[in-house]
Amino acid sequence: MTRVTSALAVLAATTLTLTACGGGDTRNTGAASGATTPDLSERCTEDRAGGTITVGEYAMLPTFAPGQGMFGVRGAAQSAAVYDRLMRWNPESEEFEPKLAESLESTDDNTVWTLTLRDGVTFSNGDALTAEDVAFTLDLHKDPATRSNAMTDAMQVERTRVVDPLTVEFSLAEPWAGFPILLAGVAGEVIPRDAYEATSPEDWAREPIGAGAFTVASYTPDQEVVLEPNPGYYGGPVCPTLRFVRIPGSQGTYEAFQTGELQVGFLRGAKTVTAAQDRGERGFEVVTSAGSIVNLNAGAAGYDGVLTDERARRAFAHALDRDLIDQRLTGGLGQPTAALIAESSRFYDGLEGPRYDVEQARALVEEVRSDRPDWDGSLTLLVADSPENMETGVAIKALLDAAGFDVTIQSGPVAQVVARQFTSDFEAVVGGLSPSDADPASTFAGAMVPGGSLNLSGVDDPELTAAVSAFKAAPDLESQKAALDALQEVYNRVVPFAVIANAEEYVVIDDSVRGVAPTLSSTMMFDGAFVQD
């Protein structure tokens, strides 16, 4: 067997960029920015216990039900703090590292992976963490009723075998060198089987039990979550109380950070991110491919409207002047694109998405109207009520109306819009993807394959499914680039979602806060955090 680090040698760096070198180095990475990376060399010790860290979230974790804390933008730090994770992606070393696990090894062809757990780890209720719990957790993520964000990837595991109380063997449906990403995400947040089965899913969603550094002290949906230190945490002493709050919009979050109301803030959007970096705020930056998109309902949840016609979806994509949207939203500071992958990605090979072409958009709209005389061009666009999203919605409406659509904007709180997205209760909705360069194929599979946990559009196109599968199975970087080229071509025809821009995320961290560590998808780990007087 090969160790996880050598098995992943084919994988290059993640899109998470440390804005300066680690270990407290204060060198700038560009002339315009004085931002630096928080020091990762220290963590909580008993003499540092106490204090409260207040974190401003972009969107709160919907619930503590299994599989909900996939992305930092959607409250993953809360979930990871309570459950911990089997593995952690380390953006500095560019490797997956064991966390709740002791080790993860694979066969030479990456079809069988063996996980060994740390001995002596307990859940917050005192029960021992075992291989049976790991197997039970994976089964939960495979169950469509769980509505896990990791379901698509979890389904790649054909068989989970408990070898002994601390060892689990995963046999995959096909070779997958990026398999550790599954265990570094929500599927690596182990659920204690006995405790879970002894309560209802509704109660568990509010009062979970995990092996993480924190336990839930109070939970007010979409408003506030307070977490207290877990005295039995296997990783050593836990210092602060964590308080997570939602402040609408990144600008409001950054202002609260500047006034000291927050010690950590999740910022999303080039304008606010650039402002924070130019002021020299410490933090961690992520540039996410396809981070800003519009999901287009291709037939999910019984929808039978105009967007079930791929010509209408292509018209939507061609109608978007992404540079104009960027100028309006960020003053030209963003990364507008129609491609699936950012130019900064190791996978990028000159890919192009559907170009802005208003004449082509109009022609497609007229084709559709000719074939659907009952359709008058009307389309409903759902957007969250944050200022950035509302501005995006207004810009998109103007562009679509110019191409022959007649757009009505609906808006609502972020949590409500997210809930409607994940139940496919929309016609078109502003959203985003969060593929990691550690293994973007897993996210694209979830978003484009029938039954995928991120397939909010309900798209079911055999050619698209085959192209995604080929990308995921490709064994090396050059073949992955070729497979992604093919996927982009099919995507340009099918358009299950329209890419607007890459997303820029920046988690700002006050000088008083130490020991916070990043992992996948802008998720912060607080088990080593402490407040420095």
Image: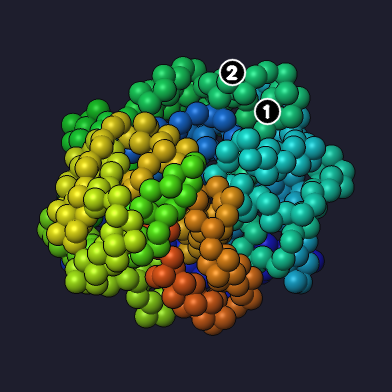
Q: Residue at x 19, y 68 (%)?
A: 358
Among the two numbered marks 2 and 1 on one chain, the one whose residue lies closer to the N terminus: 1
Q: Residue at x 26, y 35 (%)?
A: 411
- Counting from the top left corner in percent of width and height, residue 43 is at 48, 40
Quadrant of image for the C terminus: top left
* 215 displayed left or right of 190: left
Q: Determine which residue is flagged by label 1.
A: 123
Q: Identify which amino acid the numbered label 1 is placed on.
A: Phe
Which disc number belongs to residue 203? 2
- Counting from the top left corner in percent of width and height, residue 63 is at 50, 28
Residue 353, placed above or below residue 317: below
Residue 413 in view (yes/no): yes
The front one of 212 and 183 is 183
Residue 88 in view (yes/no): no
For discs 2 and 1, the disc positioned in front in the rendered view = 2
- Counting from the top left corner in percent of width and height, residue 282 is at 29, 48
